[in-house]
Image (cartoon, rainbow, N blue to C red):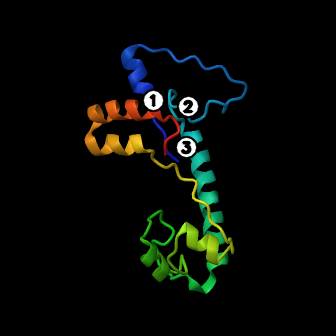
């Protein structure tokens, strides 16, 4: 859990915070208010509980495939190959291979945005030349792909 604290900046620039709430903790973790020790303790307990639930779920799901390693649940992350070695993954794959091989989807549709001709020209020839070309192309063929 992360955030920003602007309390010092507000004091420096003479900005007054006006926060009206119903409940002592409704403004908790507001970036414009200092964090109390009581709030820090509460949030840390909550994060520790969530982390414990995550660890238990991974251990239950992965079972004996997991390697016993003190930093396994420390927040570090690894490459796909290292994740396999640690028992966190079974094999390398792609979204398409999982859809096809695990979920058994026959036709995988890629909904990623595709650049049109004008956008490709802008990248290739530079912004100023590309703008002129893009304007010319799109004004003549507005639906060109």
Going from the N terminus, do you reach mark 2 or mark 1 first? 2
> Which residue lies at the image location 65% right of the left edge and 68% below the top edge?
107
- Asked if disc 3 and disc 2 are in contact, CB closer than 8 Å, the reply is no
Q: Provide residue 1's location: percent of width, then percent of height.
A: 53, 48
Q: Residues within 10 Å of mark 1 (few under 14, many from 20)?
A: few
Circle 1 sits on which residue? 139
Of discs 3 and 1, which sits in the foreground? Answer: 1
Q: Is residue 123 above or below residue 65?
A: above
Q: Secondary structure at mark 3?
A: helix
116 or 83, nearer to the observer: 116
> Which residue lies at the image location 38% right of the left edge and 31% below the top edge?
136
132 or 28, nearer to the observer: 132
Residue 5 visible (yes or no): no
> Which residue lies at the image location 45% right of the left edge and 32% below the top edge?
140
Circle 2 sits on which residue? 30
Going from the N terminus, do you reach mark 3 or mark 1 first? 3
Of discs 2 and 1, which sits in the foreground? Answer: 1
Query: Would residue 21 be found to the left or right of residue 30 on screen?
Result: right
Q: Secondary structure at mark 1?
A: helix
The label on residue 40 is: 3
Distance from disc 3 to disc 2, alpha carbons, whole Å, reads: 12 Å
The label on residue 81 is: none
Distance from disc 2 to disc 1, alpha carbons, whole Å, reads: 48 Å
């Amino acid at each position: 859990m992360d955030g920003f604290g602007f309390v010092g900046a507000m004091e420096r620039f003479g900005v007054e915070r006006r926060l009206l709430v119903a409940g002592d903790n409704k403004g908790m973790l507001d970036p414009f208010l200092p964090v109390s020790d009581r709030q820090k303790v509460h949030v840390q307990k909550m994060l520790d509980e969530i982390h414990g639930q995550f660890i238990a779920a991974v251990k239950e799901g992965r079972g004996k495939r997991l390697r016993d390693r003190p930093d396994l649940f420390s927040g570090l992350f690894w490459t796909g190959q290292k994740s396999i070695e640690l028992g966190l993954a079974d094999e390398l794959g792609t979204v398409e291979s999982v859809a096809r091989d695990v979920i058994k989807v026959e036709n995988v549709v890629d909904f990623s945005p595709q650049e049109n001709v004008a956008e490709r020209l802008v990248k290739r020839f530079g912004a100023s030349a590309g703008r002129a070309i893009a304007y010319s192309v799109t004004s003549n063929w507005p639906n060109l792909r």
